[in-house]
Amino acid sequence: MPVTEYQERVYTLLCQIPSGRITSYKSLADALHSSPRAIGGALRNNPFAPEVPCHRCIAATGYVGGFQGDWQKAPSRQNMEKKLELLRGEGVRFDGKGMLVDRGRWWSEFEV
């Protein structure tokens, strides 16, 4: 599946996030002089997941956020559970409400 130049820029930054760390849609948007919604659109269409780790991007509030285009309120919650599983496997923990437990996991040291 072909990707746009913008998506390539987003995916390049995602690949800079180390395992066990997370960033926010806002941090990615700030690095690219873009908007969090545009970042979400690029992540929603990521054909390279999980190698290009879009699961490492969460809401700036610390909420786990969506995955593969769906948010928690999707009827099955399947995509959110998959995102939580991937992050748990990297040592990133969330509470029962989907909020990040360890704020020391944030990453924003992007090289653009």
Image (cartoon, rainbow, N blue to C red):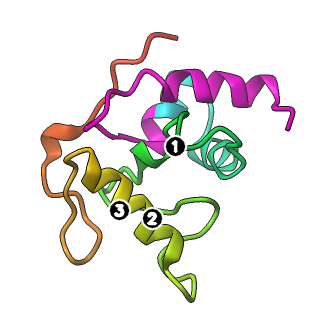
Is 37 displayed left or right of 89 in the figure?
right
Name the side, left or right, on which 30 lies relative to 70: left
For the view shown, which residue lies furthest in the top direction? 111
Does residue 33 appear in this view?
A: no
* Residue position for label 1: 54
Q: Please name the amino acid that badge 3 sits on.
A: Leu
Considering only vertical position in the picture, is 39 above or below 112? below
Q: What residue type is labelled 2?
A: Lys
Q: Confirm or deny contact between disc 2 and disc 3 (CB under 8 A).
A: yes
Span of residues in magenta: 1-27
Q: Give the amino acid at mark 1.
A: Cys
Residue 9 position by quadrant: top right
Task: Name which residue lies at 21% across and 77% down.
Answer: 96
The circle on residue 82 is 2
Real-space CA distance between mark 2 and mark 3, rounded to the nearest whole angstrom: 5 Å
Q: Report helix, strand or loop for mark 2.
A: helix
On residue 84, the disc is: 3
